[in-house]
């Protein structure tokens, strides 16, 4: 009997020792252990090792992209509005003759990015709008005058050209492969303090209906973007450009963690047309559209809010000639479904002027087809969001 108790004590001691070792060094082996209970709820805990490679520095990405980023200095003459008291002799006595007052020069600062080694540079339209002179400061310290090849106010993009070769062009990546949570860097010259790199993540993709541009498909990021960053690149963790920084949402004038960049998928389309034609050629149907809301869908007895409501028709325009009427709901263009008004405008813009588009629409609960001969979208100076006119 005594021998039996001795064996039992030794076995128990060995088992407790093994258990102690497992608890200390390999707790994941204890898959049978119960999860802690909180407020009567059983919590499932993940005990698997952390997967993936931890990023400790983004210096390589910054080093790769920084040489391609430039500062864009612009200046223009601004004439003051005539003073209503300009002809008053007393006014002239104290302030002189208004005709002798010279126009003031206004200087602005933005950023840009070199997209080809032979001197093409991308920036925002609002950076170079109405500028008389444009000067580019390169990363290596050189400065050179630039000319505007063309600009597109409806996407807020512009292409500049400098007479230099052998420039360090940035590498593009595919923005449609970006994901929310990806690390990004914004590079530019905020407030004129000098070239600056800020880090954040992609907060959202496909942002529309912001009222910033006519054609919107923004990447939203919390990487700090401030005045002076406009036109600079948003790059991924490998130093490749994923977008052009364009706008911020702010109540103070500075970054509040909501910035917007134009994705390279749109940038490339606009850039290629500007370099080829000097401007962007888009399809146009002469319609004013608005989104379908749940209330509108219910009033039209529809099951969902897909499609775009025709709010207005330009008399004598392509849609008018095709028999489309206000109140019609467009659901597809050339068999491509329409989710909202922005999607419709983008589909129409990609059509080739002169071609005939097959439009599927709903009119009083009846499906109809219309053939619209697409025209060229008129160039406008001030974009109007969610409107094709």
Image (spheres, rainbow, N blue to C red):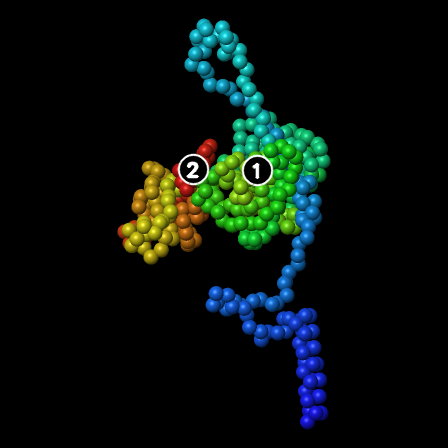
Question: Residue 226's mark?
Answer: 1
> Residue placed at 63% from the left, 48% from the top?
240
User: 288 and 296: which one is in front?
Assistant: 296
Q: Quadrant of residue 255?
A: top right
The residue carrying mark 2 is 384
Q: Position of residue 167 (x, y in %)?
A: 69, 39
Question: Measured along the vertical axis of the image, is residue 130 above or below residue 188?
Answer: above
Q: Residues within 10 Å of mark 1 (few under 14, many from 20)?
A: many
Residue 351 seen by the camera: no
Picture quarter containing residue 89? top left
Q: Nearer the viewer, mark 1 or mark 2?
A: 1
Q: What percent of the width, then of the height, locates residue 333? A: 41, 50
Q: Residues within 10 Å of mark 2 (few under 14, many from 20)?
A: some
- Name the quarter where the C terminus is drawn: top left
Mark positioned earlier in the residue sequence (1 or 2): 1
View extreme (bottom): residue? 1
Q: Residue at x 72, y 35 (%)?
A: 140
**In the rendered view, does 294 fall on the left or right side of 142?**
left
Seen at 41% across and 42% down, the residue is 386
- The N terminus, quarter of image: bottom right
Mark 1 near mark 2, Cβ–Cβ under 8 Å?
no
Q: CA distance from mark 1 to mark 2?
A: 24 Å
| Front residue of this view, candidates 109 and 157 | 109
- Residue 82 visible at all: yes
Helix, strand, or loop for circle 1? loop
On the picture, is 59 further left or further right than 109?
A: right
- Image position, residue 62 (x, y; %): 67, 45
Name the residue nearer the viewer: 201 or 134: 201
């Amino acid at each position: 009997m005594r021998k039996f108790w001795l064996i039992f004590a030794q076995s128990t001691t060995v088992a407790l020792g093994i258990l102690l070792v497992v608890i200390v060094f390999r707790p994941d082996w204890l898959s049978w252990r119960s999860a802690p209970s909180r407020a009567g709820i059983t919590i499932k805990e993940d005990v698997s090792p952390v997967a993936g490679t931890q990023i400790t520095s983004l210096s390589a990405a910054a080093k790769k992209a920084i040489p391609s980023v430039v500062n864009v200095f612009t200046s223009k003459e601004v004439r003051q509005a005539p003073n209503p008291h300009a002809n008053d002799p007393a006014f002239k006595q104290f302030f002189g003759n208004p005709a002798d007052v010279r126009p003031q020069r206004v200087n602005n600062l933005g950023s840009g990015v070199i997209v080809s080694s032979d001197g093409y540079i991308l920036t925002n339209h609002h950076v170079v709008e109405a500028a008389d002179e444009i000067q580019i400061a390169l990363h290596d310290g050189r400065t050179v005058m630039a000319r505007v090849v063309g600009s597109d106010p409806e996407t807020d993009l512009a292409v500049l050209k400098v007479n230099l070769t052998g420039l360090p062009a940035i590498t593009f990546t595919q923005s449609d492969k970006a994901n929310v949570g990806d690390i990004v860097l914004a590079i530019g010259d905020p407030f004129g303090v000098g070239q600056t790199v800020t880090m954040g993540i992609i907060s959202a993709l496909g942002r529309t209906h912001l009222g910033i541009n006519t054609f919107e498909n923004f990447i939203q990021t919390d990487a700090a973007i401030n005045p002076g960053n406009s036109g600079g690149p948003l790059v991924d963790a490998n130093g490749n450009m994923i977008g052009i920084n364009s706008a911020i949402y702010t109540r103070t004038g500075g970054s509040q963690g909501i910035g917007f960049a134009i994705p390279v998928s749109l940038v490339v389309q606009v850039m290629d047309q500007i370099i080829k034609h000097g401007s962007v050629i888009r399809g146009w149907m002469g319609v004013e559209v608005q989104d379908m809301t749940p209330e509108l869908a219910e009033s039209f007895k529809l099951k969902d809010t897909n499609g775009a409501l025709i709010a207005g028709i330009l008399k004598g325009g392509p849609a008018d000639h095709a028999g489309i009427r206000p109140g019609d709901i467009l659901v597809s263009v050339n068999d491509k479904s329409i989710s909202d008004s922005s999607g419709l405008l983008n589909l129409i813009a990609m059509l080739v002027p002169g071609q005939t588009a097959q439009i599927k629409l709903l009119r009083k609960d009846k499906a109809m087809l219309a053939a619209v001969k697409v025209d060229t979208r008129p160039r406008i100076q001030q974009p109007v969001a969610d409107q094709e006119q």
